[in-house]
Amino acid sequence: MSANIAELEKRRAGAKMGGGQRRIDAQHAKGKLTARERLEVLLDEDSFEEMDLYVEHDCIDFGMQEQKIPGDGVVTGSGTINGRLVYVFSQDFTVFGGSLSARHAQKICKVMDAALKVGAPVIGLNDSGGARIQEGVASLGGYADVFQKNVLASGVIPQLSLIMGPCAGGAVYSPAMTDFIFMVKDSSYMFVTGPDVVKTVTNEVVTQEELGGAITHSSKTSVSDLALENDIEALLAAREFIDFLPASNRDEVPERPNADPWDRLEPSLDTIIPPSANQPYDMHEVIRKTLDEGEFFEIQPLHAGNILCGFGRIEGKTVGIVANQPMVLAGVLDINASKKAARFVRFCDAFNIPIITFVDVPGFLPGTDQEHNGIIKHGAKLLFAYGEATVPKITVITRKAYGGAYDVMASKHLRGDLNYAWPTAEIAVMGAKGAVEIIFRGLDADGIAAKTKEYEDRFANPFVAASRGYIDEVIYPQSTRKRIALGLRKLRNKNLENPWKKHDNIPL
Ligand code: HXC
């Protein structure tokens, strides 16, 4: 071996030890993988090509000139997932706690630039103590550079963040601007200020987990889309997830052929709607029976369960699913459900992913809590998102489509391309009893019952809407998959553009 090659090998081996064996052991003792081990799980075998292995910080304060570790706390480069190109950065907690220096930020920006240039997703594995304290403002500037890249990349390439350790201060805002966040239970947390500062300022005593752990952010705040058990589960979920996404906004949705017949009938759907309008059923079943091989990748399953969002495939091609869930709060639209679905619809629209909407919605949730917290503004987000979306939109009303929520849920009036209803659909301003009590105020109980029956006979069906052309066809529930597959084939070359604008002004 020549001396040059030997030198290269020595440098590579040294750099790959990060902060040294003691810190690697400490990382393992916390149940965490190292930055490089994580990339091995995330990427196809031997596909990782590293960049900037020898980058070092240039800080000369606090004795930092004596402490230089090649790579400076973040491993960056590209690789493939099931053969498709992705760019990655993986913060190395064994090097200065994965904290972000100016050079560390520069490496992340370089990867993002490379991904933007060719149109490929960026996956960030975050495990960082935040701004590199010794560097001061240089580190803050580095964060801002990353934030700016996140903004410019938004809607151009998919950005996925995995939170696999601490994420404090500035470290939370870059993930927050990416499209999806997956967190690892018990070992990851995100907060702007940690429990100590919280105690000092507000006197509240709270654990890291309660303040910003995976469950808090996946159920309460919706900052996170999924909470996974450990590093390996999170990385495997990311592999599965990225398979659904196009590489960029100029790319087609990926295709993963499978053996599920496109025209498979599901007779069990003909009887899934219970006899009583107040009885729930599980919308997951409708979704699974419609999608290829029953595979549904649900996001935010622990937050706003009254609406379901996630990805699946029809004829091997990705579709986005939005569905009211009668099992939770009768599928009502509230603030959280509106925000959750609006963001999902916008992601699908940005990345050319057709949207399939299953509707069973009794309306918007009434009450002072909702009104005073801005259901008008938040409900408008979903209305706006559906209204601006130009991707193929196919809607299936399975049961209730009442009031404003009928309009919102990808109705014909919001440029739904194909609007189907099951024979069990009820499309009306509100439920029959409520309607009668308003328009026939003062009637006795018998009178109310009679008028309720009359209202039900008139409106508790899909045919009034169909007679106006608001519903394209009343379909057999068992044929739902087939009708959607046929519809998507027809809509493959859909070409619809909104008027030119700099950008819209969605009610934030
Ligand atoms: C430099 C850091 C560091 C940091 C940790 N380290 N955070 N070095 N800058 N921000 C180093 C430690 O000195 C230590 O070095 C090693 O990383 C591991 O840290 P430990 O504290 O031993 O680990 P642990 O007990 O697991 O605690 C992890 C931690 C804690 C919770 C992240 O280190 C911590 O609270 N760090 C500070 C967090 C913080 O306040 N960051 C600044 C946020 S402000 P050795 O040599 O011992 O291994 C911010 C502003 C940006 O980010 C705003 C932009 C908008």
Image: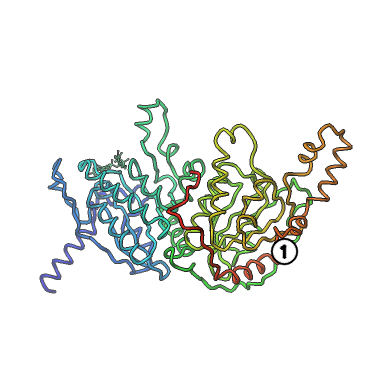
* Residue 200 located left or right of residue 365: left
Residue, disc 1: 473
The response on whether ligand 1 sits within 8 Å of label 1 is: no
Residue 355, how many percent across, how many down?
Answer: 57, 60
Q: How many marks?
A: 1
Q: Pick the quarter of the image with the N terminus.
A: bottom left
Circle 1 packing at 10 Å, graded few (<14), some (14-19), many (20+), is some
What residue is at 34 percent from the left and 45 percent from the top?
Answer: 171
Residue at 54% over, 62% down: 391
Left/right placement of residue 374 relative to residue 285 reads left
Residue extending farthest front: 500
The colour style of the image is: rainbow
Pinpoint residue 233: horizontal percent, then vertical percent: 45, 56
Q: Is residue 366 visible?
A: yes
Give the camera-side residue of 434 and 83.
434
Residue 206, image x, y percentages: 42, 32
Outermost residue on the right side: it is 446
At 63% across and 68% down in the image, what residue appears?
A: 487
Residue 479 shown left or right of residue 184 in the figure? right
Q: Quadrant of residue 264?
A: bottom right
Q: Residue at x 16, y 50 (%)?
A: 58
Q: Quadrant of residue 261?
A: bottom right
Q: If the picture is divided into quarters, which one holds ligand 1?
A: top left
Q: Amino acid at mark 1?
A: Glu
Pick the residue in front: 260 or 309.
309
Image x and y of residue 421, in percent: 71, 59
